[in-house]
Amino acid sequence: MGNSVQKLDQNQEIELPVTELPDESESFTCEICIEPMLLPNKKFKNQNRCVHPFCIDCMVKYISVKLEDNVGKIPCPSLSCDQFLDPISCRNLVGPQLFVKWSDVLCESSVLGVPQCYCPNRNCSALILDECGGNAKRSKCPNCKRNFCFKCKLPWHAGFGCEENRELRDANDVVFGVLAERKKWKRCPQCRRFVELRGGCKIIKCRCGADFCYSCGKRVYRHGCNCDTASWFYRLIFGIFCITLVILAILFIWWILKISKKTCV
């Protein structure tokens, strides 16, 4: 039994399968890239919250750009729409890496009421919260363990203020600032020179003529500072002593006048 070949009649027509053309009503033009899309599955659907014609590729790029700017609550790109994108419904579109970043940004945005900053170290950039009630200055990043200034959001500027830190300085200035901080040198509040106290009274007279307290660094106009209890006690005793002298002087003058009147009589 062999293979048989059946010949078709020349007048017999062969019916070929007809490929279905895409429905023109389902095709759309993306408003971002202005490219016609013939496949309806390329259209982005925001859980049917809004039906604006955006393709999936453009929306993934749009979400990525927003996350680079640390925007977690991403709005619909249409100018006349007030809806926001749903991260859960976009999870399979953006991929696991971008979805994790989206989740992190949303977590960070939930603590916007707390003072925060990012570590200035380029290799770290960890989110850090101020747990000191808004008074944090010198801080250590819990991730990279490097010191930075929470006030100006820059690496720690030992011995220099935040405004001075914004100015360009060479490496010697930075090393000198670290030395001044380790030695606990104080700066004159008027001329900003560093001063070292080796002994004696804590009230320093700088070469510029300004008097300041070496303990608190504030300028004083009298010999004494109330930054500690002992100095405040001495000033109180001195005040009482001066008042007592004035009262005794008044009583002495009154006694002299009284004696002089009796002598005249």
Image (cartoon, rainbow, N blue to C red):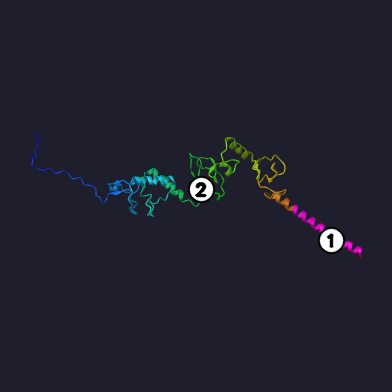
Does the magenta-highlighted stretch encompass residue 9? Answer: no
The quarter of the picture where the C terminus appears is: bottom right
Does the magenta-highlighted stretch encompass residue 254? Answer: yes
What label sits on residue 116 in the rendered view?
A: 2
Question: Residue at horizontal 76%, vertical 55%?
Answer: 240
Residue 253: name its quadrant: bottom right
The image shows residue 196 at horizontal and vertical percentages of 67, 40
Q: Secondary structure at mark 2?
A: strand
Mark 2, Cα crowd under 10 Å, few <14 / some 14-19 / many 20+, is some
Q: CA distance from mark 2 to mark 1?
A: 68 Å
Viewer-closest of 251 and 15: 15
Viewer-closest of 36 and 103: 36
Looking at the rendering, the stretch of residues picked out in magenta corresponds to 238-264
Question: Residue at horizontal 70%, vertical 51%?
Answer: 232
SS majority, magenta: helix
The quarter of the picture where the N terminus appears is: top left
Viewer-closest of 191 and 105: 191
Counting residues from the N terminus, which is met first, the one under dot 2 or under dot 1? 2
> What is the three-letter code of the residue carrying label 2?
Gln
> What is the three-letter code of the residue carrying label 1?
Trp
Question: Residue at horizontal 83%, vertical 59%?
Answer: 251
Mark 1, Cα crowd under 10 Å, few <14 / some 14-19 / many 20+, is few
